[in-house]
Image (cartoon, rainbow, N blue to C red):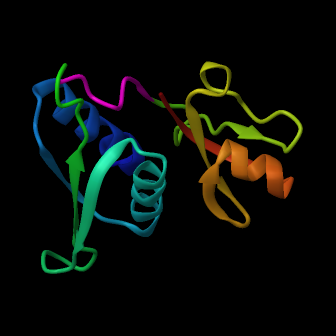
Amino acid sequence: MTDPIADYLTRIRNGVGAGHRVVEIPASNLKKEMTKILFDKGYILNYKFEDENGPQGTIKIALKYNPKTKVSAIRDLTRVSSPGLRKYADSKSLPRVLNGLGIAILSTSKGVMTDKEARLLNVGGEVLCYVS
């Protein structure tokens, strides 16, 4: 697999499209940090890290839906930086997703964080994905 982050986003996107409650994804430290951000910002219901399968283990993500309309909390997941074309942003040109309603997940020198946190800490980094 050449792009594990794209695989992570695609598995979540496919789970939302199929209406699944839980998605199982092979784990890595970067994926774990991205999952924590999605949970903190309210895009997923819950998550669980399991270390039984393989050296890295798996991540089980419970997807979040509106109880009445059955619409997912995640409307769009877009991969920005890829292994063939990395996208970086400095602290002054950080992207705004849906004029501040969505989030951009960045990998910075201070760890994985959202665009809003990076603005507060005045750091830039690689733009991994957009979530709205």
**Number of numbered callouts drawn:** 0
| Residue 67 location (% of width, % of height) | 17, 31
Residue nearer the viewer, 44 or 35? 44
Work out whether 42 lies above or below 36. above
Residue nearer the viewer, 75 or 54? 75
Task: Give the left or right position of residue 21, taking residue 99 as reference.
Answer: left
| Residue 12 location (% of width, % of height) | 26, 39
Is 71 a magenta residue? yes
Work out whether 73 lies above or below 4. above
Q: Is residue 124 visible?
A: no
* Predominant SS of the magenta segment: loop
Residue nearer the viewer, 111 or 73? 73
Is 62 a magenta residue? no
Quarter of image, res 11 = top left
Task: Give the left or right position of residue 31, taking residue 109 as reference.
Answer: left
- Magenta span covers which residues? 70-77
Q: Is residue 116 visible?
A: yes
| Residue 106 location (% of width, % of height) | 63, 48
| Residue 128 location (% of width, % of height) | 56, 43
Identify which residue is drawn at 75% across, 51% down.
118
